[in-house]
Amino acid sequence: MSDELNANALMKHVQALAQGVGPRPTGHAAEAVAQEYVRDTLHALGFAAIEEMPFATWDTWGYATITPNVLGLVGNWFGKLGGFGRLLGGALSLFSGYHLLQASDCGKQPLAFLYPNKKQTKNLLARIPATAERRHRVVLVGHTDTNKHRQTFAPTMKRYLPFLDTLNIAFPLLNGAAQVAQAFGAGKWAEMLRKVSAGGMLVSLGLLLADELEGYVEGANDNATAVAALLGLAAQLKQNPLAHTEVWFAFTSAEEVGCLGMHHLLDEYGHVLNNAYFIDFEMVGRQEIAYVTDHSSFSYLTGYKPDPESARLAQQTAQTHPQLEVNGRPMIIGEEVGALRGRGYRGLCLVGVGDDGWLANWHQYSDNYENIQPAGIERAARFALAMLQELDAQS
């Protein structure tokens, strides 16, 4: 039986996606080519039933952050209508802040109906049933789309991400509170707070617009490495399926614009997956691989953790397989586990750790094939397989 999880075999998938296809913006033709590559590979492995889950999406994360800032700023003009105008403007700003809180943790975005430029994309699903009585169900997750090169994620800037995103959320919340206070007769302090917070929203808007000017990245690490790990595991488990664990392979789209693919998967199959384990692969093309114990997300106001059952399973696997050198650690990261945990599902993220403790080449043009460390992909895939085998052995 061949070993489908060796680094050389996995890197062939990374090369096909990163160099063969290139940047894969959400819902664009290049992502469809990448999805066709996944489908063809699964067919070659013997998967006869590959489910397509089409859905509508937008193609950049900028809509999630720019739209609420614009709406909140527009709300400030309603003050000219008197007390009712202040209440309406305050409600718009508060709602904008709530939207940003949701978006920061990959929750559903309440202002999404305002976004232009709707595209069509899809998730791909493949399954391997248990060979005996099914006791567990596990969903392995990796997304097919790539993000833009973003100045706010540059090596000299990313350390300020939590501070900047906290301000981006706080400004509309403070602006809304100030306007509501003015509607009930508050004086100069409320007007000063309104002006300062509106100025902050305007600065945020300028930074966010500037962040949209660059092109899309090759996405070798984010997230061709995850797709490669899933395809390797699909090949391995197709040869040697588990006795008591059904495994789903979810190749999701639209992760980079708000985890829409995961939300669509849960909307369709949430009733089936309510007790499933989800293992999400994110940027695993680095030498050091970890499972995330605390997702700090992008601000000091948000964040989430894996569920206790998944965390215990990962810790047990790390202790049983010390040769894999995978340990738990907190990370500043926002990904599909946020969507899962926000909706009450299990979820754990396997991630590659850069030399500086951050995600490596995160949303940068340097996220290319030449900067991948192949051993990390193999280590992440083998650790996930070990987690599956640990779970399968449980009653």
Image (cartoon, rainbow, N blue to C red):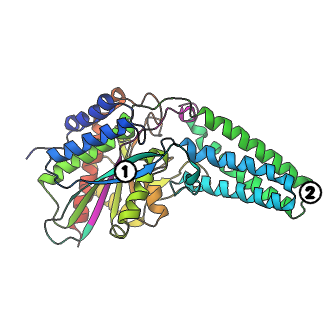
Residue to which mark 2 is pinned? 187
The structure residue drawn at horizontal position 41% and vertical position 42%, both measured from the top left corner, is 27
Q: Position of residue 332 (x, y in %)?
A: 51, 46
Residue to which mark 1 is pinned? 327
Q: Position of residue 261 (x, y in %)?
A: 40, 53
Question: What residue span does the magenta drawing correspond to?
Answer: 137-157
Question: Within 10 angstroms of label 1, few (less than 14), some, or many (20 or more) residues?
Answer: some
User: Residue 245 occupies which quadrant of the picture?
Assistant: bottom left
Q: Which mark is residue 41?
A: none
What amino acid is found at the position of numbered circle 1 in the picture? Asn
What amino acid is found at the position of numbered circle 2 in the picture? Gly
Q: In the structure shown, which secondary structural element does the residue marked by tag 1 occupy?
A: strand
In the rendered image, which quarter contains the C terminus? Answer: bottom left
In the image, residue 114 lies in the stretch drawn in magenta = no
Report whether 146 appears left or right of 209. left
The reply to whether residue 173 is visible in this rendering is: yes
Q: Nearer the viewer, residue 196 or 371?
A: 196
The reply to whether residue 346 is visible in this rendering is: no
Q: How many numbered marks appear? A: 2
User: Residue 313 occupies which quadrant of the picture?
Assistant: bottom left
The structure residue drawn at horizontal position 36% and vertical position 52%, both measured from the top left corner, is 54
Q: Nearer the viewer, residue 51 or 381?
A: 51
Is label 1 or label 2 in front? 2
Q: Position of residue 220 (x, y in %)?
A: 36, 34
> How far is disc 1 from disc 2 in space, using C-alphas?
54 Å
User: Which of the two labelled residues, at mark 1 and mark 2, occupies the earlier sequence position?
Assistant: 2
The structure residue drawn at horizontal position 58% and vertical position 57%, both measured from the top left corner, is 110
Q: Report the residue that reaches farthest toward the left.
A: 1
